Image: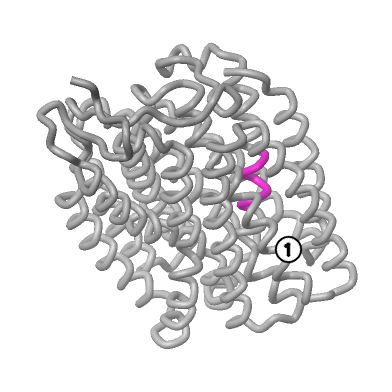
Amino acid sequence: MRRDLSDKATTAEGAPVSGKRWCYAALGLALLLFLGIIYAWSIFVPALEEEFGWSRSETALAFSLCISMFCLGGLVSGLASKRLPFRRIVAACALFLGAGFILASRADSLAEMYLGYSGLVGLGVGMGYNAILSNMLRWFPDKTGIVSGLMLMGFGAGALVLGPLCHRLLNSAGWRETFFAFGIAYAVLYLAASFLINPPPADSVFPQPHGGKKTRESGGEVSAGQMLRRKSFYIYFAWAVIMNGIGMALIGHASSIAQELGIAAAAAAVLTGIISMANGLGRMLGGFCFDLFGRKTLMRGASVGVILYAGLLLVCLRTGDSALVTLIFIISGLCYGLGVIAHSAVIASFYGTRNYPLNFSIITMHALPGSFAGPYLAGLAHNALHSYAGLPYQALLFGGIALSLALLLKRP
């Protein structure tokens, strides 16, 4: 009997699962959106610095450590996927998120904040991010770019949805109560989700992916060990480090940059949401770009975009023209989103889907050096210059290196 290659996927017994997989996609989108709370960190920075007297480099380090633990959480999730069911990994994510936020709400020192927010919350977000995204791509092997973009749009838009909420709770209840409420809410939400979403049955049959030779650069089904022996991995990993670093630098300092230009705190929180919205939109557009035009266009376009917003940011900071901030945040968010979608789409395309959870968790380790090369370095420069005047030059340097690496990468 000829297999149905329409958008409907079937199991070997002929039971349709197309409707089910789109329901799972909607749930996965929501779950990743709430994990995007880590992008709202800059909203809490002024309150923490005022209460404890922490420096900008110290609060920036909290964000860098959080992103580092996010990477570690993804790696733990990828390794655990070989032995543990998806449900248990999401349940562990719930426990880490709940414990992390609650511990952070009781913090009276940097060490306690680093342990609670940076350590446990970052670890929980990384585990959930890897597990949910990997599971979604198993449901949609025929729509890798588009579904990756949809899922990562949710993750990137987290600060847009949650940023204003964080700001209101911060003003009405304080940062401690806000963190505590998040701890309870996140633990309940992800424990419930662990019972609601499942991987596809082993005997599922899905439509064949569309796309010609131009957009598909398959390196076959590659194990993690084989991937680590390929030159393409290291070129791509370096590009990912650079793109993550400069993206995180702007996201991690977005609210503070806006306030340095004289924008009120409430408006700065909205602008943080705008960069998150653009981040999410960039991920969705990046998915379509990957499926239609291929990896080369996606990587090179994102790199050129970084150079563009570096120039605009330089003009903005020199002239004090706050009107340019919105445009800069939109362009930077788009570029960061394009870079993020490249990670999931390129790894699935280059190295296959069979070992995707572990392979993807390895590539997400790019955020470990990136989080220090980006936001922490920007924080140190701010301490030295007492302004963000050095950030445009950092972005310009990173954009030039990223474009060179994108041109150097030729094949899987």
Left or right for 331, reference 187: right
In the image, farthest residue toward the bottom: 172
x 73%, y 70%: residue:
325
Up the image or down, 138 lies above or below 265; here it is above
Residue 241 pos. (x, y %): 62, 37
Up the image or down, 10 lies above or below 246; here it is above
The colour scheme applied to this rendered structure is one colour
Left or right for 3, reference 73: left
Disc 1 packing (10 Å; few <14; some 14–19; many ≥20):
many
Residue 35 pos. (x, y %): 39, 56
Q: Where, quadrant-wise, is the C terminus in this rendering?
A: top right
Task: Kindly tell me whether residue 41 is visible in this rendering.
Answer: yes
Residue 244 within the segment the image draws in magenta:
yes
x 84%, y 56%: residue:
311
Nearest to the observer: residue 49 or residue 75: 75
Left or right for 100, reference 230: left
Which quadrant of the view contains residue 328?
bottom right
* Number of numbered discs: 1
Residue 93 within the segment the image draws in magenta:
no
Residue 356 pos. (x, y %): 38, 28
Nearest to the observer: residue 5 or residue 251: 5
x 48%, y 77%: residue:
164
Left or right for 13, reference 165: left
Which three-letter amino acid code belongs to the residue tagged 1?
A: Ile
Q: Where, quadrant-wise, is the N terminus in this rendering?
A: top left
**What are the residue bounds of the magenta stretch?**
242-248
x 38%, y 54%: residue:
32
Task: Kindly tell me whether residue 69 is visible in this rendering.
Answer: no
The residue tagged 1 is 328
Nearest to the observer: residue 189 or residue 205: 205
Up the image or down, 169 lies above or below 227; here it is below
